[in-house]
Every structure is written in structure tokens, then in C-alpha cells.
Image: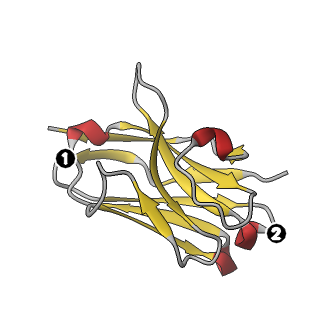
Amino acid sequence: QVQLVESGGGLVQAGGSLRLSCVCSGRVFRLYTMGWFRQAPGKEREFVAAITASGGGTLYADSVKGRFSISRDNAKTTVSLGMNSLKPEDTAVYYCAADRVLSRLSKNPHEYDDWGQGTQVTVSS
């Protein structure tokens, strides 16, 4: 069983920055594509960013491209999301997720197998 625990959320003013982290308990973390998703009140969960097992491939939602950066440290079984130039519309609960299918890089939340509990990000205007 893979357990994912996010941290780093909080309240920030528009234009500010936050860095989210997600620690994975599984020993095969290095084999998983990892993704970040978010869900705002009354909205569906949406893709934010993903990174391949090796870290060599990344994928971003158009809405965050150029502002957010996903990275991972396989030795520390951690995936991070750096968020800059935050906007009020970035306000949501952010979730990390693991895809056990080797080498896939997907925006589809249904293709992710394991999820964290989420961390709240609130951006004030």
C-alpha cells in the first residue's frame, strides 16, 4: 500500500509563492509517475502537473505553465510543486497522486492509483 502525505499549503497573497511537498511511503516510489491535482469548491478535480519516474519528463496544465514547477527526489521519495506568481484562481485543495503504470505521463486523474489527503492553498487578492 502506497501512502502519500502532502504538506506546504497555506494562505498567501496574489503574486506570492508556495512550495508543496508530498512524501511517499512506498519503496518503489522511483518507479511511479507522480502527479499533482487540485480541486476548488464546486469544481471537478483538475490536473496541475506530472513527472515521470526518472524525473526526465514533465507535463503541465496550460493554466500553470511557466508559474509552477514539479520536481522529485527519488532518494527521499518526495515530489514537490513550486508555485510562483500565484493567483486567486489557484485557490484549491492540492493533491499528489501516484500512477503505477511505468512511463505513462497522464493528465487523467482516473489513471492514478494512490492519492494523498490534500493540502489547502488559498490565494487572497
Question: Could you tell me which secondary element the residue under label 1 belongs to?
Answer: strand
Quadrant that contains the C terminus: top left
Q: Residue at x 26, y 64 (%)?
A: 66
Mark 1 neighbour density, 10 Å: few (under 14) some (14–19) many (20 or more): some
Q: Residue at x 73, y 65 (%)?
A: 102
55 over 92 or under it: above or below: below
Residue 109 at what x, y percent from top left?
A: 59, 41
Return the mark for residue 27.
Answer: 2
Seen from the viewer's position, the closer of residues 31 and 108 is 108
- Mark sitting earlier along the chain (1/2): 1
Q: Residue at x 47, y 27 (%)?
A: 44
Residue 94 left/right relative to 124: right
Q: Are marks 1 and 2 in contact (CB under 8 Å)?
A: no
Return the mark for residue 119.
Answer: none
**Amino acid tagged 1:** Gln
7 over 47 or under it: above or below: below
Residue 75 left/right relative to 61: right
Q: Residue furthest top?
A: 42
Seen from the viewer's position, the closer of residues 24 and 8 is 24
Residue 70 at what x, y percent from top left?
A: 45, 66
Residue 105 at what x, y percent from top left?
A: 58, 60
The picture quadrant where one finds residue 108 is top right
Question: Could you tell me which secondary element the residue under label 2 belongs to?
Answer: loop
Between the residue at mark 1 and the residue at mark 2, the CA separation in whole angstroms equals 37 Å
Q: How is the image coloured?
A: secondary structure
**Amino acid tagged 2:** Arg
The residue beneath circle 1 is 13
Residue 64 left/right relative to 37: left
